Amino acid sequence: MKEEDKLLAGVLFRPGHPELRALKLRSHKLSAQYSRTDEDDVEIRQKLLELILNEFGEGSFIQGPVFFHYGKHTTIGHNNFFNYNLTIQDDALVTIGNHNSFGPNFTIVTPLHPLLPGERKLMHDKDGKPARLCYAKPVVIGNDCWFGANVTVCPGVTIGDACVIGAGSVVTRDIPSHTVAAGVPCKVIRPITKEDTMANKPEILADYTCLPETEYPLD
C-alpha cells in the first residue's frame, strides 16, 4: 500500500516519505503563490485553486493568505466565503459543502499523533526499520454554516447544516445541524429556530425585509 493510500485509509503513515513530501511541497508552493496575489487577480487565483484543490465550487471566494497542506484532499462546494488566513491541513479528506461563511483565521486539522512521547519519536515497520508515524481522520462541513473568527476544527469532526460556530471555538466533536455551538471545547448551546429571524429584531432590521420562511426552512 502506498503512503498516500495509508493516509486516506486512516492508518499510520510516514509523513516524511518522499512520495508525500513531494505532494506537500507542490501544494505549499501553490498556496504561497496564491497568498502573493491581489484580490482582483481573479483569473490567476482561479487557476491556482484548480491546481491546488480537488474541487472548488462556482461562486466560492478565498480572501487569502491561504495554506493547504496537500490541497488535493480538499473539496469545496459553491458560494462559500473564506476570510483572511485560511489553513487546511488536509492529510485526510476535507469536504466542505455550499453557502458557508468562514471568519478570519479559520483552521481545519486532520492529522493525529500517538499520545506516548516515545511513539511520537519512533516506531518500527514490519521489517523492523525505524519510522516516524502519524495518522489522520477526515473532516466534513455541511451547508449554510457560519463560523466566527479563530475557529479550529479538529480531526474526525462532522458539522451539520445551518450551524453557527462561535468565535474562538475549538471543535473536537460532531455538531448537529441547526444549532449554535461555541467554546473550548466547542459545545452545543441551543437549537436555531424560526424565532431567530431578523424580523424579531426591528431595531437591527432597519428598512430591510426578510425572505419568506420557505426560503430557509429549519426542518
Image: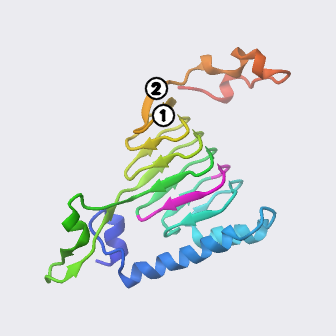
Residue drawn at point x = 24 percent, y = 57 percent? 115
Left or right: 149 with respect to 128?
A: right
84 drawn magenta: yes
Q: Specify which label sits upstream in the sequence, 1 or 2.
A: 1
Q: Position of residue 114 (x, y in %)?
A: 25, 61
Secondary structure found at label 1: strand
Q: Residues within 10 Å of mark 1 (few under 14, many from 20)?
A: many
| The disc label shown at residue 124, or none | none
Provide the residue span drawn in magenta: 78-91
Where's residue 207, x and y in %? 86, 21
User: Residue at left 65%, top 62%?
Assistant: 65
Report x, y in % for residue 9.
32, 64
Q: Is 138 part of what is drawn in magenta? A: no
Q: Residues within 10 Å of mark 2 (few under 14, many from 20)?
A: few
- The front one of 93 and 186 is 186
Q: Quadrant of residue 37?
A: bottom right
Q: Amino acid at mark 1?
A: Ala
Label pair 1/2, CB-CB below 8 angstroms? yes
The furthest residue to the right: 207
Viewer-nearest residue: 213 or 111? 111
Give the left or right position of residue 35, taking residue 18 as reference.
Answer: right
Residue at image position (53%, 68%) is: 71
Q: Which residue is mark 1?
A: 182
Q: How is the image coloured?
A: rainbow
In this view, 138 is above or below 209: below
Q: Alpha-carbon distance for marks 1 and 2?
A: 7 Å
Q: Residue at x 52, y 53 (%)?
A: 107
Image: 101 above or below 58: above
Determine the secondary structure under disc 2: strand
Residue at which label 2 appears: 189
